[in-house]
């Protein structure tokens, strides 16, 4: 009887140890598997969408302000006498889907979009080095035509589709590539394409705990737009202050809508056609 009891106790001890080892392994897997976050500080690098979405139930109120060109000289106070602005609201439906709307004073443009996370960068037992997102949007230009000839509303519309592929390479460095397609229902001349293909890239480098430098560039493939249209180039800084993120930047793009800065930029950096501007982002928790 004593031998049977000893065998029984030995079996219980063995099972307990094995179950503890199994729980430890499960716990280690749970701890070490995590999504990579804060690749960029806000949902936009400067103009373009970033790898980040607002969290589910969170509303992000954005105000973007862009002054005139620096080469306006002292008479225009180096662009400060002129300004355009955009305000918008981004909302997280859940942790992988975000929607947004906005209004740009430049050409009185309204825009709406959604952005979805297809694949998230993560580390641990599953090591996925990239994040992939899809963003689609629509813009409507409502400014009155200078020739007083009205057009159908559908001709005021344009559509933007972007595949955003990027990675947080290190604690302070992130990048993304952004193949883009823009469809404009109406173009100014027969020499322009309604469908425009663009390749974009963006980079973020942290300088301190609360300051980072950002840059983005969009190359329009040849023979698609008018000769005076330039590639959009923007450089700026992120400054985090509690619940706000300030983005100070310089860019050759006047418009802050997707279709505008992608296909309507006519400023040349070498000629001083540079705008100083800023974005302010403030988030609010609507639903927990």
Image (tube, rainbow, N blue to C red):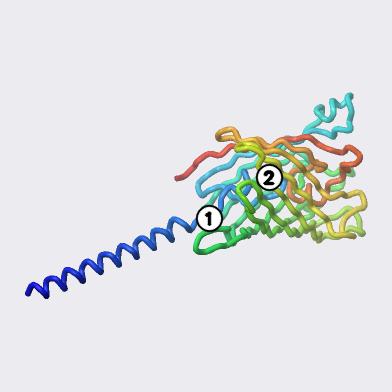
Would you call the spot at circle 1 few (<14 residues within 10 Å), some (14-19), or many (20 or more)?
A: few
Give the left or right position of residue 213, taking residue 144 as reference: left
- The secondary element bearing badge 2 is classed as strand
- Look at mark 2 in the image and give the residue it sits on: 205
- Look at mark 1 in the image and give the residue it sits on: 35
| Residue 52, x across and y down, in percent | 60, 50
- The vertical placement of 25 against 40, above or below, is below
Compare residues 239 and 218 and report the one nearer the observer.
239
Compare residues 19 and 88 and report the one nearer the observer.
19
- The vertical placement of 134 against 173, above or below, is below
- The vertical placement of 224 against 267, above or below, is below
The nearer-to-camera label among 2 and 1 is: 2
| Residue 121, x across and y down, in percent | 58, 58
Residue at (72% x, 50% y) in the render: 202
Residue at (56% x, 50% y) in the render: 37
Residue at (69% x, 52% y) in the render: 175
Would you call the spot at circle 2 few (<14 residues within 10 Å), some (14-19), or many (20 or more)?
A: many
Give the left or right position of residue 216, taking residue 52 as reference: right
Residue 280 shows up from this direction: no
How much space separates mark 2 and mark 1, taking CA atoms? 20 Å
Q: Tell me the quarter of the image containing the N terminus.
A: bottom left
């Amino acid at each position: 009887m004593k031998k049977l009891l000893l065998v029984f106790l030995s079996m219980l001890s063995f099972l307990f140890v094995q179950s503890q080892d199994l729980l430890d392994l499960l716990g280690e897997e749970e701890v070490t598997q995590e999504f990579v976050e804060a690749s960029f500080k806000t949902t936009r690098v400067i103009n373009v969408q970033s790898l980040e979405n607002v969290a589910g139930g969170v509303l992000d109120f954005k105000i973007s302000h862009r002054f005139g060109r620096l080469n306006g000289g002292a008479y225009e106070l180096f662009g400060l006498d002129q300004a355009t602005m955009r305000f918008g609201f981004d909302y997280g439906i859940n942790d992988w889907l975000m929607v947004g709307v906005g209004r740009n004073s430049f050409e009185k443009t309204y825009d709406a979009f959604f952005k979805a996370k297809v694949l998230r960068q993560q580390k641990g037992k599953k090591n996925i080095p990239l994040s992939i997102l899809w963003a689609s949007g629509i813009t409507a230009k409502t400014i009155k035509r200078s020739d007083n000839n009205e057009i159908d509303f559908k001709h005021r519309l344009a559509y933007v589709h972007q595949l955003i592929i990027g990675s947080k390479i290190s604690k302070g460095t992130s990048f993304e590539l952004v193949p883009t397609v823009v469809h404009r229902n109406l173009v100014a001349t027969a020499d322009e394409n309604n469908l425009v293909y663009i390749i974009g890239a963006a980079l973020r480098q942290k300088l301190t705990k609360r300051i980072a430098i950002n840059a983005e560039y969009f190359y329009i493939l040849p023979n698609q737009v008018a000769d005076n249209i330039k590639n959009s180039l923007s450089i700026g800084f992120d400054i985090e202050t509690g619940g706000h993120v300030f983005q100070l930047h310089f860019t050759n793009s006047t418009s802050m809508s997707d279709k505008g800065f992608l296909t309507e930029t006519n400023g040349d950096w070498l000629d001083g056609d540079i705008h100083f501007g800023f974005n302010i982002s403030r988030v609010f928790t609507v639903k927990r």
